Amino acid sequence: MKVGFIGAGNMASAMIGGMLQKGLLQKEDIIASSATQKTADRVAQEFGIRTTLDNKEVAKAEIVILAIKPIYCEGVIREIRDQIGENQIVVTIVAGRSLQWLSDTFGKPVKLIRTMPNTPALVGEAVTALCPGELVSEEELEEVCRLFRGFGKAEVVGEHLMDAVVAVSGSSPAYVFMFIEAMADAAVAEGMPRAQAYQFAAQSVLGSAKMVLETGKHPGELKDMVCSPAGTTIAGVCKLEEKGFRSSVMECMKACADKSRNM
């Protein structure tokens, strides 16, 4: 099976690395295109795959992954659509571009799968939502899911949830990084060296996330386990509530989903 990436930036590189590391694909099975020779050379050297500046060359692959920014999507589709046949699968990681929009832009029946991974793919811990078009078979969808599980978790969702996915996972690493940075800054203010503060803050977020995933307990129950009566943690929780921590996060995600919905 040949897989082609149109776009060879950070996300595409993370996906390629994960697929190769898990042995899901061999180097000769992958081709990637980029807008610049510098990027093409970097990716070729890093992964040992074939690279090109010609998107049409990539469009010959059995699975074509559009790993590009939304503003370039229409132009790229118009460039490659004559190369895409009825047996190929086109996978997008483009925010705000619906299956209907993609189908209309191709202007012909195409097997489409809309996805939204996130940047933790760079460390093999992504979560990806996949939404198949009506022409995609269950076997074809499972094959694409298998590839995406090479760099994290993959779940099939209805398209009506994709804007929520953008908010809760696609964009959320940025919120988490801000939270880690803020915690580290506060620790530095208390006298902790900055490098150590980042280690403590990041490891605490990692460990807390694993507790949610592995214990199956409600986050509120896990929070209560830390909050001793009249203790330090409940004092901090009270201050977060006073400053509107939860409502700020919810409003942040709503703004993100609204942006995705209206792109």
Image (tube, rainbow, N blue to C red):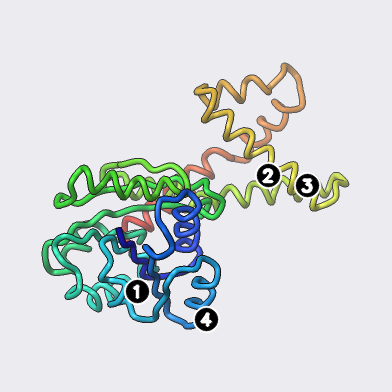
Circle 3 Cα neighbour tier, 10 Å, few/some/many (<14 / 14–19 / ≥20) = many
Q: Which residue is at a point 32% across and 55% down the rendered structure image?
A: 261
> As shown in the figure, which amino acid type bears the numbered disc 2?
Ala
Q: CA distance from mark 4 to mark 3?
A: 36 Å
> As shown in the figure, which amino acid type bears the numbered disc 4?
Lys
SS assignment at label 2: helix
Reading the image, the residue beneath label 1 is 72
Quarter of the image where the C terminus is located: bottom left
Of 24 and 206, nearer the camera is 24
The reply to whether dot 2 and dot 4 touch (C-beta < 8 Å) is no
Q: N-terminal of the two: label 4 or label 3? A: 4
Horizontal and vertical percent for residue 220? Answer: 55, 24
Reading the image, the residue beneath label 3 is 197
> As shown in the figure, which amino acid type bears the numbered disc 1?
Tyr
Q: CA distance from mark 1 to mark 2?
A: 34 Å
Q: N-terminal of the two: label 3 or label 1? A: 1
